[in-house]
Image (spheres, rainbow, N blue to C red):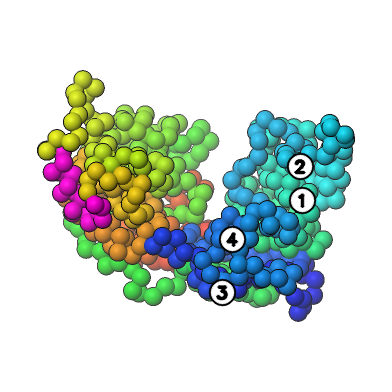
Amino acid sequence: MTDKPGAAPIIEMRGIVKEFPGVRALSDLTFDVLPGEVHCIVGENGAGKSTLMKLLSGAYTPTAGEIVMDGRAYSHLTPTLAQQMGIEIVYQENDLVPTMNAVENIFVGKEMTRGTFVNFRRMLERVRELMDAYRIDIDPMQTIEKMSVSDQQFVKILKALMNRSRVLIMDEPTSMFNVEDAGKVLDLVREISGRGISIIYISHFLKEVVQVADRITVLRDGSVIRTYNNAARDVQMNDITRDMVGRPVDMFYQKERCEIGDVMFEVRDLQLTPGSPKLSFRVHKGEIVGLSGMVGSGRTEIVRAISGADARHGGDILLSGKKLTVKSPRDGIRAGIAHITEDRQRLGLNLRSSVLENTLLVDMQNMKPSILYNYKAVKYTQKADKIVRNLRIKTPGLMQEVVNLSGGNQQKVVLGKWLYARQSVYIFDEPTRGIDVNAKVEFYRQMTALARSGNCIIMVSSDMPELISMSDRVLVIRDGAIRCELTGDGINEQALIKEALGVIDNDS
């Protein structure tokens, strides 16, 4: 696949640092891609894969370091410059227009013209020529909304190739495919690289990574841990998983253990869609149950269905043995379920409202419509002030707009509104993503206090030390199903990664 040993890299990233408020996503990262090679990037959730990809596509600007292409160094790329240099990205998310056909999507914004008219016939010919060249079999006249997921992916790849790409970044290209369709993508990857186009291939499916890679780079906590230079010959999946998970002991929070009581919350035969697996699990009083799995495994979909944020096809939800009717977020709130969402700014807060108003937000929904809620009343402000002080939220006062707070303090306000409402079941979805170490410790302290007070907690997290430190049990989710339950010493990095990826010991 690669042109030849010793070939000069087509693109290099040197000493790259990328920082967000309170978080260093990439640290002194050095990475390169050779002409015509398939260079795979692997790492657990949050390792820095997506950040690296967005730096190369021009979506992010590095805090430090440089990107070198064709011998010229750049402090950063813009989306336009990246495209001009031949860097194209095929995102995991669907960015196609559903009501347009394949040809229209491939040429959207770059239509071929004849005089003042769009030359659709010529565009169709070009698409068919490219399909023949890469042996892609789809109907170019079909609208995207009527295509299978795999055919949509091929349209996205054709769109990138039509722009004469030199470096093609593929983000989880087979994450929603069956085995047969995934095999077609791998064949296409080999075909593309065989024509001299370099591919950066990001995937958590280690079996296909080992099949298709010339080189494999493992990221962990924003740093390059190792690059395997002869991937097809020298790599075993167990080696990769070990590289993905090793961390120093001081990264793990020492949680105080709480007394665990009887079953408090139960999910029976939960089914998200007619064709999805049925899920059942229990959470005891005082217990923290972690949900682990790779991005796209179905963790967030499960908790959103439980809280009423999304509809579910079937199944029962019980609290203290009583069946709940939860068909909306309001139903969930009234049933005693708190849902601390991952997207705090879009779903968890009214950014232009005050700390006080946001803290009272959930409790106001429990009021009867006929009752006027004077949120500035002393009884409300005193209670809200106590929560703000207890959470150590850094704010000039209760009337400060939340938009002016740091990310960590915004996250604390989200938690504060649920503490004010006094729920029974607390669902945390990525509770400490994007906040600094001190804010994390404060969150862990509050979660422990909630458990000690007799509540139960379900925690979705991609942070491995967080899962291991805070969970009494961990349910590993893969392909929308509970694959296993880990307890005690069985909750460790190796087990979590292997179960989430479906890696079997001694598999190669």
Label 1: which residue? 163
Q: Earlier in the sequence, mark 3 or mark 1?
A: 3
Distance from Cα at disc 1 to Cα at disc 2: 10 Å
Farthest top residue in view: 370
Magenta stretch bounds: 380-396
Q: Is residue 340 left or right of residue 294?
A: left
Please state the horizontal and vertical placement of residue 437, each as a whole percent of the image: 33, 65
Kindly report the secondary structure that dominates the magenta region of the rendered protein.
Answer: helix
The residue pinned by badge 2 equals 110
Q: Residue at x 39, y 52 (%)?
A: 430
Q: Which mark is residue 401?
A: none
Q: Dividing the image into 4 quarters, which one contains the C terminus? A: bottom right
Given residues 321 and 16, the one toward you in this image is 16
- Labels 3 and 2: the sequence-earlier one: 3
Q: CA distance from mark 3 to mark 1?
A: 29 Å
- Dot 3 corresponds to which residue? 15
Q: Secondary structure at mark 4?
A: helix
Say whether disc 1 or disc 2 marks the residue closer to the N-terminus.
2
Q: Is residue 321 above or below residue 406?
A: above
Measuring from the top left, give residue 219's x and y in whole percent. 53, 68
